[in-house]
Image (cartoon, grey):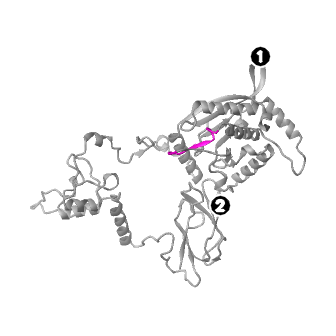
Amino acid sequence: MSTQILMPALSPTMEEGKLAKWHVKEGDAVKSGQILAEIETDKATMEFEAIDEGRIGKILVPEGAEGVKVNAPIAILLEEGETAGAAPSSNTSTNAPPTKPAEINAAMQQLRDAIGVTPEAPAPAPPPAAPKAAPAAAPAPHATTNGSGGRLFASPLAKRIAQQSGVDIANVNGSGPRGRIVKADIEAAARGGPMKAAAPAAAKSAAPAPGAQPNASGMGVTPLPDARLFYKQGEYEEVPNDSMRKAIARRLTSAKTLIPHYYLTIDCDMNALMDARAKLNARSPKGPGSYKLSVNDFLLKAAGMALVRNPDVNASWTETAILRHAHADIGVAVAIEGGLITPIVFRAEEKGLIEISNEVRSLAERAKTKKLKPQEYEGGSLSISNLGMFGIKNFTAVINPPQSAIMAVGVGEDRAVVRDGKIVVANVMTVTLSCDHRVIDGATGARFLQTFKDFVEEPASMLL
């Protein structure tokens, strides 16, 4: 029997993707484990393998198609002896949609009646007007307003049954979503079931306006106007948003809106770290086994050690519990074409500087070619975003959920500082920690930053 090959969910957050390339064509025989296609998500391009054996009967989604929803059929796999015209059997993962307009309308109506949803399509055309000599005076029993002028929400089937049964729908208590009146409510009312009491005025006024987007506090959110309204055509260039840019916009908007950010800033004396880095790099062998430690490698190690010393920061928020992580998994922000990705160095507290350096370099190279796997950039304890190489002195960063903090690192520069009552020159770096206040209280975040500062200013202490 033929089966449908569906768009895979290659990560927990994936909702759609781009079918970047097919590795098979119609008529090809495939085996389990064979590469069928390359799927491009907002972060990476991954290979999609066949699960079953068979022959490709039909490719439903062409190569290069964007915005393909997860679980949407992309191809049909035929068994031995089947022809390409065979219809997908009942054991397919997704039923084929109706192809005739009448079937589509019937299926949609059944779905609306089942969940009590009024269709958003235009209202049907009104019946022909009655002759002027005999105008209709009686109001329709399926009116869509209640006695106080408020709108009633009822399924079309419920309205039709109410009209046939002579039930005043305005007095029926809806049991569907958001109080919508469905078929069962009309039947109960016809049998003498409970009727709806008048809704208090206060309750009506508290209801959100139709179409409003509720946020975490339940308040309506007014969308921002399209920026093109403010500029003349021809004076700007439109660069279409790709899947990565859309995902970044969606996730960071949610993070900034729903996570209560606050910020802590501290200055770190980098003299000892810079000296240690120079000495270690000078000892690097030539050829195989060579290394070149960066400042970021030291900071990543220091952050991992500080998380272990401050487990309340090494945590993630859920509605029912705070998750304390067993290891320090540090994300490193990497700029790639069209966006940003944060691959993770797992168990950073257990790794040496050379191992961290090699791993970060490998992750960054694969990130720039979109070859990372989802498990290499999802999750983590904390992220580090370093803009010091651009001369940025300090900045704040947006938390990358499910993490509860992100460290923004500025440039290390010579500054005048006071020591023992004297003004001296020191290499100073400013670090700003963005914290999720649901997880990390102010004093907790401050203790973490102080621990991090101690490791940076005395690198040898990370060996203890």
**Residue at the disc numbered 1:** 420
Q: Nearer the viewer, residue 348 or 45?
A: 348
Q: Amino acid at mark 1?
A: Asp
Instruction: Tell me which segment is drawn in magenta.
Output: 311-320
Q: Does 201 sit left or right of 133 as displayed?
A: right
Quadrant of the image for the C terminus?
A: top right
Q: In the image, is residue 95 above or below residue 15?
A: below
**Residue at left offset 35%, top offset 71%:** 102
Residue 205 is situated, as x and y percent measured from the top left of the image, at: 30, 40
Residue 235 in sight: no
**Residue at the disc numbered 2:** 46
Please tell me whether residue 154 belongs to the stretch shown in magenta.
no
Residue 49 is situated, as x and y percent measured from the top left of the image, at: 64, 68
Q: Residue furthest top?
A: 421
Q: In the image, is residue 330 above or below residue 456?
A: below
Residue 460 in sight: yes
Q: Amino acid at mark 2?
A: Met
Q: In the image, is residue 273 above or below residue 228?
A: above
The overriding secondary structure of the stretch rendered in magenta is loop
First in sequence: mark 2 vs mark 1: 2
**Residue at left offset 42%, top offset 71%:** 98
Residue 140 is situated, as x and y percent measured from the top left of the image, at: 18, 58
Q: Does 205 sit left or right of 41 as displayed?
A: left
Q: Nearer the viewer, residue 52 or 229?
A: 52
SS for dot 1: loop
The mark closer to the camera, 2 or 1, is 1
**Residue at left offset 72%, top offset 51%:** 363
Residue 381 is situated, as x and y percent measured from the top left of the image, at: 64, 44
> Residue 262's image quarter?
top right
Circle 2 Cα neighbour tier, 10 Å, few/some/many (<14 / 14–19 / ≥20): some
Q: Are marks 2 and 1 in contact (CB under 8 Å)?
A: no
